Amino acid sequence: MQPDLRLAASRRLSRQEFLQVGFSAALGCGLSSLSAARSAQGAAKPRVRAKAIIFVFCTGAPAHQDMWDLKPDAPAESRGEFKPVETKAPGVRISEHLPKLAGIADKFAVVRSMTHKLPSHEHGTHYLLTGINQNPPGATHMASRNDWPCYAAGLQHVRGGDEGLPVGVHLPTYLHNGYGFCGQNGGFLGSKYDPWQITRDPAAPKFQLDELSLAEGLTIERVAARHNLLEEIDRCRRELVESAGVRSMSQRKSEAFDMLTQGGKFREAFDLEREPAAMRDRYGRHSFGQSLLLARRLIEAGVPIVQANMGTMNRWDTHNANFRVLKETLLPPFDQGLATLLADLDERGLLDETLIVCTGEFGRTPLINANAGRDHWSNVFSAVLAGAGVRGGQVIGASDVQAAYPATRGWYPADLGATIYSALGIDPQTQVIDRLGRPHQLNAGEVIAPLYG
């Protein structure tokens, strides 16, 4: 019997959801009716809870029904090979191949009714990394200055930053397919707001960033003299630095100079050799684990937003051999790294002030294809959140029996964005001004209030 994947007649968009995916979300400016709906519903606006955000991004879209939302009673062609297991949180069950996370499930919440309408990697990445539900005008599937700004850019625009310290760091990969994916930079705010992009594997031997290291024979004074000379040379060409999606080299060098001469803690954060060997082993000597360890070190150094990509572009895109790839390649290092990050932050007293967000750009199909894989599916997927006031050990929302559609209220990327900004103490409705002087509402979503219930 083939599972019925049609949207149930009772599953219609509410007026509030329509507004979220409608014209106002595309522009980023909430209509007055959306604001009214928020007020009428008494949407929670939590106090400032987070000093930092670590966004753990599973690029390529992981199979939610094989990790966070297993359906053992679904038809065989849908439920898959994995079994759900009990966790430390009563009533919460996740995949048998996430044993370490199952052991600390009281520390995180799972939102099982995330949803949006476009199962494209480029667009989904744009949505989840910026908190929008539709492309803004002029944006395409390739990074450009028409894109919505990433979270670090939004934070920097509203709050500013500390001299010698970036507001955001993305690591260890830049997501691209010959062109950059949208959502990884300052978008329409301009290159001034682009986060630092790290493209070196922290698990590699002798990992370091050359721009934060002095070559043999150089001193800070000599570097400063060279910097001043380059600044004069660059003065006449600064109007040309706004390239599509890539920040200017002169700006990058200038920031690197500031961090080299002033950002001592920032530089030291990249020196993973300072970390006890036992802790590095605990996270795992692989890219996933060492990237999350580096993320922890960066927030300790004062960087407010760190995005850690779990793999290169579309690494979790399991069209083929979904179960084998998850079981043998992706889930073991992911489970080790994320579970250690949560436990480590808790032990250091940092979990209460650090919001952890983990998701992909969408989910995967309820039906298993002929290649034992799952294909693109955005109608429902899961996100995991922890820290900064989030009540762990709970599940928010539900999908239907085949993990195909939300069975309860759907939560959108804009709602995740509203939750992130609110946790940082920023009103999602804050107005921001783009590089052409046009006003936009930063976010048109609603805080996922049950996270704090």
Image (cartoon, grey):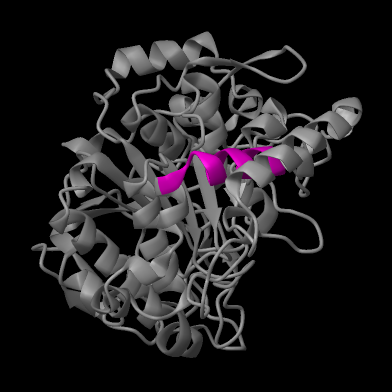
Q: Nearer the viewer, residue 155 or 183?
A: 155
Residue at 31 percent of width and 73 percent of height? 283
**Percent position (x, y) of residue 251?**
72, 37
| Quadrant that contains the C terminus | top left
The secondary structure that most of the magenta stretch takes on is helix
The part of the image, by quadrant, that contains residue 428 is top left
Task: Inspect the magenta stretch and tell me whether residue 4 lies in it.
Answer: no
User: Disc count in the image?
Assistant: 0
Q: Is residue 301 above or below residue 188?
A: below
In the picture, measured across the screen, residue 34 lies left or right of residue 124, that is left
In the picture, measured across the screen, residue 273 lies left or right of residue 158, that is left
Q: Which region shows up in magenta?
A: 253-264
**Percent position (x, y) of residue 397?**
29, 48
Q: Which of 7 and 123 is in front in this view?
A: 123
Query: Is residue 380 at least partly visible in the picture?
Result: no
**Percent position (x, y) of residue 368?**
53, 80
Q: Which of 151 and 282 is in front in this view?
A: 282
In the picture, measured across the screen, residue 35 lies left or right of residue 24, that is left
Residue at 57 percent of width and 77 percent of height? 318
Query: Is residue 352 at least partly visible in the picture?
Result: yes
Task: Inspect the magenta stretch and tell me whether residue 261 lies in it.
Answer: yes
**Percent position (x, y) of residue 172?**
55, 63
Residue at 40 percent of width and 39 percent of height? 304
Residue at 82 percent of width and 33 percent of height? 242
Q: In this view, does 35 lie above or below 114?
A: above
Q: In this view, does 289 lie above or below 352?
A: below
The part of the image, by quadrant, that contains residue 39 is top left
